[in-house]
Amino acid sequence: MGERVFDGHSDLLCDVARRRLAGERQVLETHHLDTLRRGGVEGLVLALWASAPGETFWRGTLWADPADFRGRTEQLLRHGRAELAESKHFRPVRTVAEAEAARSAGQIYAFLAAEGMAAAGEDPDGVDWYYEQGVRLGMLTWNETNALAAGAGGDPSAGLTAAGRRAVRRMGELGMVIDVSHLNERGFWDVTDLADGPVIASHSNCRALCDVPRNLSDDQLRRLRDTGGVAGLNAFHGFVHADRARQTAWTLALHAAHMAEVMGAEHVACGFDFCFFMGSGNEGAAGLEDAAGVPAFLRCLERLGMSERERAGIARDNLLRVLRQRLG
Ligand SMILES: [Zn+2]
């Protein structure tokens, strides 16, 4: 039997919402369950990504007003909840104890994450609203600039706003996991200075191998390690290598090896960010187009000399450790 895998960043709720808006039901079971099972995926972090451009992936759907982040987030939540309620194969969870119960019942556990918390805006209760919806992991921004911070595509000189600082403190009080994957670099340092617990970058690779703003420098990797957090390996081709020919599962394994060297293997996790259902331009690295490629990817780690324990940590255990510490 292969490794059991916990994918720390999945955009499947986008496919769920889009197809349910078009009248489909049981989207996960019909289109995704078999692939997840073949990949050994036992759990997912499902992202609420409310910043998606309306004219692309969402064309022809009833996707809400692009400026209405709260409305979009509610729409994703509504469809995601309905989908999970209909499925005996998936279970929404808020703690690792609940995840373990789901696993014992043979179900795929699903945590909820906010990929961009623009809906919190400057509302002092905005973070509480996410928490009440069951969201347990949160990124202040996607790539955009919002009332909290600037994303990787935003103003490089902007750090966290006063509202962003309040949000980080409130997430700490509530016991949410803070995820810096989409922040610009100043925001990254602001968050890791403020946060009093482990900070994760759920789906970011190494700049040493692929120098793009969504990836992390060695100094940033060491900082995540010092908080007790993890960085999650991202299969999106453009974050794996600049050269098309090297956008492969093997090169992503080299990112894992680099992270392990810089931080220690116990701070490496998976956040594959599979977006094959979003159409052209969103492909995963060759061999990691979807979850079915994960077992072969993990064999690359073995070929690089990683022990069984290190591989199990990267595949699942390291992220579960951080979540257990934060969520129980
Ligand atoms: Zn993302």
Image (cartoon, grey):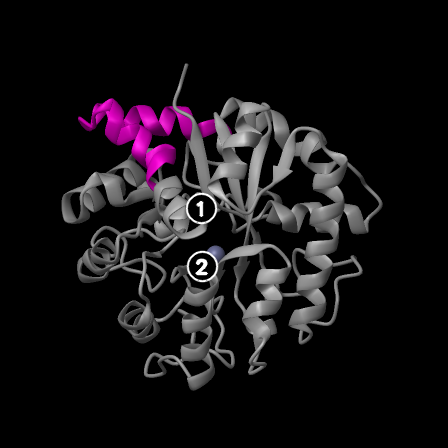
Q: Residue at x 45, y 50 (%)?
A: 327
Q: Amino acid at mark 2?
A: Gly
Distance CA(mark 2)–CA(mark 1): 9 Å
- Look at the numbered disc 1 and say if its residue's Cβ is closer than 8 Å to ligand 1: no
The residue most toward the top is 1
Report the label total: 2
Q: Is residue 311 magenta?
A: yes
Q: Residue at x 22, y 46 (%)?
A: 259
Asked if labels 1 and 2 touch by Cβ distance under 8 angstroms, the answer is: yes
Q: Magenta segment, which residues?
A: 292-318
Q: Residue at x 31, y 65 (%)?
A: 196
- Look at the numbered disc 2 and say if its residue's Cβ is closer than 8 Å to ligand 1: no
Whole-percent x, y for residue 237 in the image: 41, 47
Earlier sequence position, callout 2 versus callout 1:
2
Whole-percent x, y for residue 90 in the image: 64, 34
The overriding secondary structure of the stretch rendered in magenta is: helix
Q: In the rendered view, tell whether residue 104 sits above or below residue 112.
A: above
Q: Amino acid at mark 1?
A: Gly
For the residue pair 160 and 203, the one nearer the viewer reads as 160
Query: Which residue corresponds to mark 1?
Result: 328
Residue 175: numbered disc: 2
Side of 108 where 235 appears, left or right: left
Side of 297 where 261 appears, left or right: left
- In the structure shown, which secondary structural element does the residue marked by tag 1 occupy? loop
For the residue pair 225 and 169, the one nearer the viewer reads as 169
* Residue 111 visible, this angle: yes
Image quadrant where residue 214 sits: bottom left
Q: Residue at x 52, y 40 (%)?
A: 44
Whole-percent x, y for residue 32 in the image: 63, 33
- In the structure shown, which secondary structural element does the residue marked by tag 2 occupy? loop
Side of 106 where 59 appears, left or right: right
Q: In the rendered view, tell whether residue 322 sits above or below residue 43.
A: below
